[in-house]
Amino acid sequence: MTFSIVGLCRRTGQFGCALSTSSMAAGGRAPFVGPGIGVVLSQARSDPRLGVLGLKSLEAGRSASEALSDMIASTPLTAWRQLAVLDRHGGVASFTGEKCTDAKGAQHGDAAIALGNGLANATVPVAMLRGFEAEPTRTLADRLLMALEHGERAGGEAYPLRSASMKVAHASGPARRFPRAADRGAEATVAVLGTDDRRLRDALPRSRAFASGRRDRGPPPPLSAPTSRITSQLASDRSTTQSGRRLHPSGPYVQA
């Protein structure tokens, strides 16, 4: 259960994605951004292997629609998948399996896709795309956040939000790597994680400071502490992940 936006800024050449969801830590398994390659989303019952496969197909020169076909052909569980692909030229393609949680759907625009499952209503993707396209002169990161905010105002997901993610990369050339403590080496020029899309906006200046590489930026602003409910859920997810009972990429049962 997730609502997401994928887009390319034709003015700067940047591309990326943002999502908000009721699942924990979905940013670690659903969005895939390859600098100089493109963007892939593997959500609903997410399988990170599909994201890797999609990026490899794009890197090999296949179009967004061809990469999507490769992903669909690789798994017998497509009915539970929601997938989206953006290539570096702005080509887009998406797929929503019939068994994904209602309301579900996708809306395509110019070099952009808004999509979701487990939504409060079917108008959420339309509202997200409208938010993304509202101010094309703003930075891509701002436009992605605006899409999430428009989607949330339209109803968002039908379940309480627990995590959000944003990743942005340049269309050509390698991305600057962040310090390992900040980003764990993720290949993106902007990558931030929060408990929901509202905290993504608070975290964006912090992420930009890391991406700039300035040594004189001073200490980053403190992040607000998560609630006890989220802390407890994180501890639960960590223990079950380590024991191998949940969040395993080989199965179709990780909701995002």
Image (cartoon, rainbow, N blue to C red):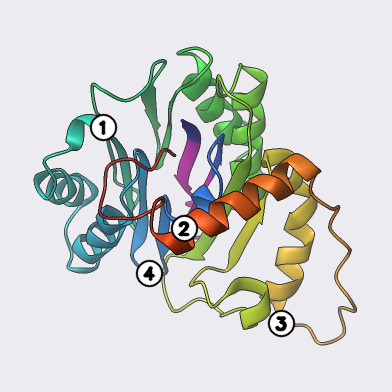
The mark found on residue 36 in the picture is: 4
Q: Earlier in the sequence, mark 3 or mark 1?
A: 1
Q: Position of residue 100 (x, y in %)?
A: 32, 25
Left or right for 221, reference 146:
right
Question: Residue at horizontal 26%, vertical 32%?
Answer: 80
Label 1 crowd (10 A; few <14 / some 14-19 / many >=20): some
Foreground pick, 60 / 162: 162
Q: Which mark is residue 80?
A: 1
Disc marking residue 213:
3
Q: Position of residue 254 (x, y in %)?
A: 38, 43
Q: For mark 1, give the secondary structure.
A: helix
Q: Nearer the viewer, mark 4 or mark 1?
A: 1
Comparing 156 with 64, the one in front is: 156
Mark 4 or mark 1, which has the lower sequence index?
4
Question: Which residue is label 2 attached to?
Answer: 241
| Residue 209 at x, y percent in the picture | 76, 71
Instruction: Determine whether the residue tagged by mark 3 lies in a helix, strand or loop.
Output: loop
Q: Is residue 117 above or below residue 191?
A: above
Mark found first going from the N terminus, 4 or 2: 4
Q: Is residue 8 magenta?
A: yes
Disc 2 or disc 3, which is closer to the eye?
A: 2
Please name the amino acid that badge 4 sits on.
Answer: Gly
Q: Main secondary structure of the magenta part?
A: strand
Q: CA distance from mark 3 to mark 1?
A: 41 Å
